[in-house]
Image (cartoon, rainbow, N blue to C red):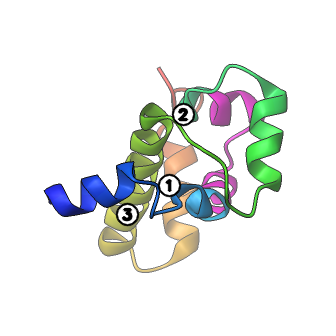
């Protein structure tokens, strides 16, 4: 584990390449712009748009990387629990209508 963290700190791993995947998940979850900002801990819409247009090479804060990992892991767990994509995406909005983010 220390080796992975060290190589990450040395800049050998470009975590920003996961951004398009995270944004696809957020779109499937039907998260609007404000929800995306809050989930990723971003305060500026222009920064959010810059991240959306990115193909990698952006230096991300540890906080954003951690938030991205939560989104990816939640998506993975939902995929394990539910077999169909539609079930995952619909149930997320249906059961947490307007309360997806406290």
Sequence-first tag of 2 and 1: 2
Nearer the N terminus, badge 3 or badge 1? 3
Separation (CA) of disc 3 from disc 1: 10 Å
Q: Nearer the viewer, residue 67 or 13?
A: 13
> Magenta residues?
22-37
Front residue of 34/81: it is 34
Inter-mark Cα distance, 3 to 2: 17 Å
The 10 Å Cα crowd at callout 3, few under 14, some 14 to 19, many 20 or more, is some
Q: Is residue 67 left or right of residue 90?
A: left
Question: Any mark on residue 78, and which?
Answer: 3
Q: Residues within 10 Å of mark 2 (few under 14, many from 20)?
A: some
Q: Secondary structure at mark 2?
A: helix
Q: Position of residue 99 (x, y in %)?
A: 52, 27
Disc number for residue 39: 2
| Residue 17 appears left or right of 73 | right
Residue of label 1? 91
Measuring 15% from the left and 55% from the top, which residue is drawn there?
2
Rendered image quadrant of residue 82: bottom left
């Amino acid at each position: 584990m220390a080796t992975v963290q060290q190589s990450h700190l040395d800049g050998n791993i470009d975590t920003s390449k996961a951004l398009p995947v995270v944004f696809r998940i957020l779109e499937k979850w039907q998260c609007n712009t404000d929800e995306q900002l809050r989930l990723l801990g971003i305060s500026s819409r222009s920064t959010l748009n810059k991240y959306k247009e990115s193909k990698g090479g952006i230096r991300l804060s540890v906080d954003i990387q951690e938030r991205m990992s939560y989104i990816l892991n939640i998506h993975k767990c939902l995929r394990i629990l539910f077999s169909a994509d539609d079930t995952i995406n619909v149930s997320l909005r249906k059961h947490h209508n307007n309360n997806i983010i406290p």
